[in-house]
Structure formats: C-alpha cells, structure tokens
Image (tube, rainbow, N blue to C red):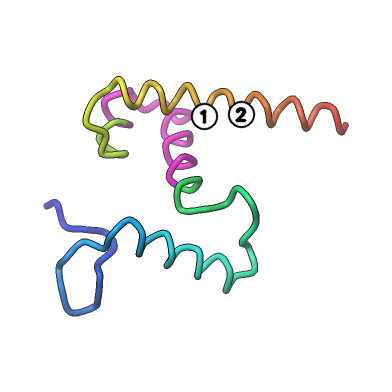
C-alpha cells in the first residue's frame, strides 16, 4: 500500500505538499523548543538515510526509502552526508 504518511487534512487521503510538511515539522520543532539552525524536515530525512546506511541497508533500500528516481541521486546524497559527518567529527575532536 502506497498511502501517504502525512495527509493534507484528517478527512482526505491527499498527500501533503512538501512545503506544508516543512511548515508542520518546523511548528512541531518550535513547540518542542527544539528548533535551531540546521534542524529541519530535510535534516530529519537525511538522518533517516544515515541511520539506514549505518544499520547496513543497501543502496536500493535507501533509494526506495528516500523515493529517489535513481540510485545515482542516492549516491550523491550519501556522499554529501559523509562529508557532513566528517566535518562534525572534526569539530568535536577540536573541542575535546
């Protein structure tokens, strides 16, 4: 079943738009006092991909999870996440 996870309203099966989802997640983050620079709907999506990769998921599984049209897009996405992880690790080690 390919039903949307987030629906536009309680009374419809229509998938929510990307923009509306970003606003909704930002609202949840603000309400929970968690909103800060770098934390967004997209960063949560990236985190899910990273966690899948770290748990041993394959490229095709991650591609399907992210709904990418091609494995090439997923490879670029994963490479980008690796760079961010490396920069974060370098910052942490400098502060220790």
Residue at x-position 29% and y-position 39% = 65
Residue 12 figure quarter: bottom left
Predominant secondary structure, magenta span: helix
The residue tagged with tag 1: helix, strand or loop? helix
Question: Residue beneath label 1, please?
Answer: 81
Q: CA distance from mark 1 to mark 2?
A: 6 Å
Q: Residue at x 43, y 45 (%)?
A: 45
Q: Is residue 34 above or below residue 61?
A: below
Residue 90: x and y in percent read: 75, 25
Magenta-drawn segment: 45-62
Is residue 78 rendered magenta in the image? no
Q: Is residue 3 left or right of residue 82?
A: left
Say which residue label 2 marks: 85
When the figure is inspected, residue 46 is found, relative to residue 62, above or below; the finding is below
Q: Residue furthest left?
A: 1
Pointer 1 with pointer 2, Cβ within 8 A: yes
């Amino acid at each position: 079943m390919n039903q949307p996870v987030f629906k536009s309203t309680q009374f419809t099966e229509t998938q929510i738009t990307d923009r509306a989802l970003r606003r909704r997640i930002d609202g949840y983050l603000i309400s929970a006092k968690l909103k800060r620079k770098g934390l967004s709907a997209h960063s949560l999506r990236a985190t899910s991909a990273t966690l899948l990769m770290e748990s041993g998921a394959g490229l095709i599984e991650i591609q399907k999870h992210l709904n990418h049209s091609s494995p090439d897009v997923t490879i670029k996405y994963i490479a980008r996440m690796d760079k961010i992880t490396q920069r974060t690790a370098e910052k942490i080690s400098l502060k220790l």
